[in-house]
Image (cartoon, rainbow, N blue to C red):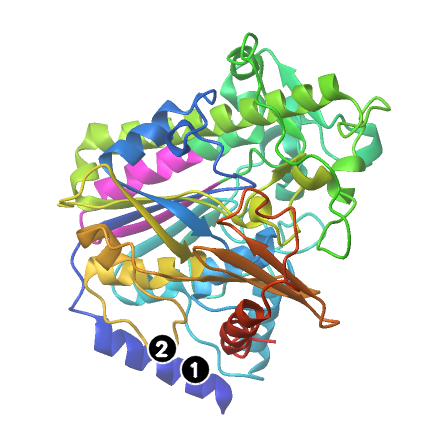
Amino acid sequence: MRRSLRLFCLGFLAGVLIGNATQTNVLLICVDDLRPELNCYGRSYIHSPNIDRLASEGHLFVNHYVNAPSCGPSRYTLLTGRYGVAKNSALFERARRIEDGLDSVYPSLPEIFRSNGYTTVSVGKVSHHPGGRGGPDWDSAEPIEMPGAWDRHLMPSGEWQHPRGAMHGLAFGEIRENASEMAVFQAVDGSDTIYPDGLITEEALRQLDLLIADKTSPFFLAVGMIRPHLPFGAPQEYLDLYADVSMPEVSHPKRPKGKTTWHKSGEFYKYHRWDKDPNKDEAFSEEVRRHYAACVSYADAQIGKILDRLEATGEDENTIVIVWGDHGWHLGEHAIWGKHSLFEESLHSPLIVKYPGMDRVGGRTDAIVSTVDIFPTLLDLVGLTLPDFLQGDSLVPHLENGSDKEGSAFGYSRWAETIRTRTHRLTVHDSGFVELYDHTSPERETKNVSKDFPEVVSQLKELLAERSETVER
């Protein structure tokens, strides 16, 4: 009965929306573990000319925050427009609910576009598993993360044999079997295809050519870059960009005192590090950060190839382009090397939007926005009615008018929840413990001021509770 209800809802939704959409294409580029470590975000030492060019032609959101500091739940919010469980398995759990008919499930972003005549294609890491499949090596026919979403969902694995191998692959087909025996970073001479993102890009270009050649329908193409995810592997030429660069000092590099969402950076420390610790070895810290920067430049180069191909065909004039980082990453701030905290560094990520006919080319918005807003924004830009189940707001007013009105971003992990406003961040642990940080002060997220400002804590707790009630548990 409930499966029939879902099918009815999908059919009804398509009936309501179809015919309202323009024929504008969508190119969504997702980048794994990308903090705002880009030249266009003020990191002048970073070589990111292609994303910077997109920012100069589009609109940059200075204060974009993801809703969860981990790949799976962050992508869940992007693709469903809703807050979900803080697990990497969130989309698989949604798929099981669909299959079992245990609950009505709202259609995903690509499902809506597909039901409105778009050809939908996913290449690389768009949902949590590259290629969107399950099984031991993430290449089984069943289960899939997003039933009914994609006409084609692809993950070229090449020498890495399967998507699981490519996800954490190093040069020339090296697969992570025992992380302690795999280098935490690497740079090897060779072409872009000696690392997995080179193959993802080649497939994305093939799919883009096919989609553009097919004049019968508009397309929704989502491409997911793996780098700069661990291990930090990129061709040597990208590391060479930073050979003579003076790396900036790590901000607030000490472990915070008291109870916080600090963690031991287990994902980073499980790799082979030659018995070095970046929290104790400044030279090694710089080395890690150079390799992260090299991975950012490598990902930027792949994105550039896709943008160049789109422009060469002339379809850029009829295509919405979004570049989105799925969450941030600590590079030693708070003595963390990784994501998963509810500090600024884990939650702050890039968001750049470009669309045909935009008036405010090169615009920037300082307002607080979040990933949950991307789903309604895309529907709004192509003229589709926004369904009631969406929990975010369209960013079109910001894109069209440069609105910097007050906003807030809700985030969560498995043990705590947080709300970020223009002036403060409040984090509440499951135990009830509270962290409050004042972003108007020099200390920002290094000093818990919750005892000094009980009225601010009370106000933000109310706002946090309103959002928390909407999370799909």
- What is the distance, in whole Å, between disc 1 and disc 2 at their CAs? 6 Å
Q: Residue 470 location in percent, x, y?
A: 51, 77
* Furthest-bottom residue in this view: 1
Q: Residue 455 location in percent, x, y?
A: 54, 71
Callout count = 2
Give neighbour class at mark 1: few <14, some 14-19, many 20+ (Cα, 10 Å).
Answer: some
Q: Quadrant of residue 397?
A: bottom left
The amino acid on which the numbered mark 1 sits, given as a three-letter code, is Arg
Q: Quadrant of the C terminus?
A: bottom right
The residue identified by callout 1 is: 6
Q: Is residue 210 magenta?
A: yes
Pick the front one: 82 or 467: 467
Pick the front one: 398 or 143: 398
Pick the front one: 114 or 378: 378
Q: Residue 295 location in percent, x, y?
A: 55, 26
Residue 384 shows in the view = yes
